[in-house]
Amino acid sequence: MSAPRPWPNGQRAREDFPRFGMTAFAERGPFEHEPVAVACRGAMQTPLTLTEELLATLPRVEQRSDFHCVTTWSRRGLLWSGWRFADVYRAVLQARGGAAPEVQWVQFRSLDGYRAEMCLEDLLQDDVLLVDRLDGRPLGLEHGAPLRLVAPGHYGYKNVKHLKSLELLRSHDEVTPIGPAFMSHDRARVALEERSRVLPAWLARWLFRPLIGMTVAKFERATRAVRATAQTEGR
Ligand SMILES: Nc1nc2c(c(=O)[nH]1)N[C@H]1C(S)=C(S)[C@@H](COP(=O)(O)O)O[C@H]1N2
Ligand SMILES: [Mo]
C-alpha cells in the first residue's frame, strides 16, 4: 500500500489519541514494560518466539497512517515505527518456523487477555506493521507496549496491543471469539464499513458513537489509578 487510504465513511477526527478499547480490559495492564516475546504457534513446523533480536534482523519501517476506531472516532497521521507483518511472516514464520501453506487466519493474544483475528491476506498488505515506536518515542503502555499490531485499513479492534502470542490457523472455525458478536466482524475493513457482522453500518454507528465518551473516561480513570499506585510504590 503506497497511496494513502482515503478518509472513510462515518468517521470523525479527534485531536487527541485516547487510550481506548473494550472496557473489560481497561484495568488489566500490563503495568510495567516487558521485553518483546510473542509466542508463535499453530499451523507451523517449529513454534518460535518473536523477540527484539529476531525483529532486528528485518528492515525497520516508518509509516504515517490514520487510525479508525469502530465507534467512529479517528486520529489522523500517527507516525509508527516497526516492521512489516509481511516481512515477519515470510522471513520468520515461513522461513524459520515452517508456517503451513494452508494458513488463512492468524489469532493474536495480548498480555491483558484481549484477542482478535485477522485473515492472512489482510495481514500481508504493505501497511500492516508490528510496532514498538509511536511519534518518535518508544511505544507507551497506554498504546500497546511492548509491541502492537497496526492495520490502518482495519478498525481499531483488530490493532491488537501488548502482543503476547499469535496462532496460525487454517480456518476461521478455529478462532476463539471475544465480546458480543454484534460488536465485531471477521475482517473489519474500514473502507467497506465492516463494523459488525450482523448490524448494518448506519445502525452500528448510531449504537457505538454514544460509547466513546464513557469509554475514554473509564480508560483514563484506570490509567490514573495505575500511575497513583506506581507512585506510592516508588516506581
Ligand atoms: N490488548 C488490547 N488491544 C486492543 C484493545 C484492548 O482493549 N486490549 N482495544 C482495541 C480497540 S477497540 C481500539 S480502538 C484500539 C485502541 O488503541 P489505543 O488505546 O492505542 O488508542 O486498541 C485495540 N487493541
Ligand atoms: Mo475500538
Image: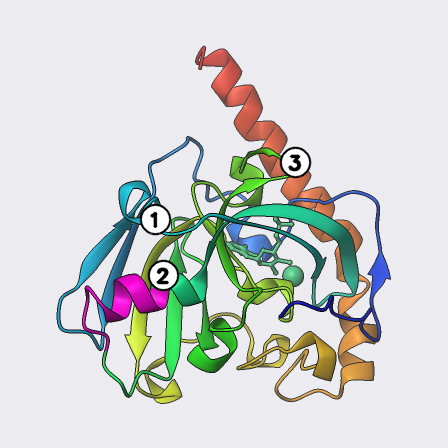
Please tell me which of labels 3 and 2 falls first in the chain.
2
Label 3, on which residue? Answer: 221
Question: Dividing the picture into quarters, in which one does residue 211 lie?
Answer: bottom right
Looking at the picture, the colour scheme in use is: rainbow
Q: CA distance from mark 3 to mark 2?
A: 36 Å
Please tell me which of labels 3 and 1 falls first in the chain.
1
The answer to whether residue 2 is above or below residue 79 is below
Q: Is residue 143 magenta?
A: no
Q: Nearer the viewer, residue 10 or 80?
A: 80
Label 1, on which residue? Answer: 55
Q: Nearer the viewer, residue 103 or 206?
A: 103
Please tell me which of labels 2 and 1 falls first in the chain.
1
Q: Nearer the viewer, mark 3 or mark 2?
A: 2
Residue at the location (22% across, 77% down)?
Answer: 43
Q: Position of residue 4 (x, y in %)?
A: 74, 66
Query: Residue 27 vs residue 92: left or right?
Result: right
Q: Is residue 96 magenta?
A: yes
Disc 2 Cβ-to-ligand 1 distance below 8 Å:
no
Residue at the location (72% across, 47% down)?
Answer: 216
In which quadrant will I find the C terminus?
top left
Q: CA distance from mark 3 to mark 1?
A: 34 Å
Q: Position of residue 231 (x, y in %)?
A: 52, 14
In which quadrant will I find the N terminus?
bottom right
- In this picture, which residue range is highlighted in magenta? 89-99
In the rendered structure, are the residues bearing label 2 and label 1 in contact, judged by CB atoms less than 8 Å apart?
yes
For badge 1, the amino acid type reads Leu
For badge 3, the amino acid type reads Arg
For badge 2, the amino acid type reads Val
Query: Residue 213 vs residue 91: left or right?
Result: right
In the rendered structure, are the residues bearing label 3 and label 1 in contact, judged by CB atoms less than 8 Å apart?
no
Label 2, on which residue? Answer: 88
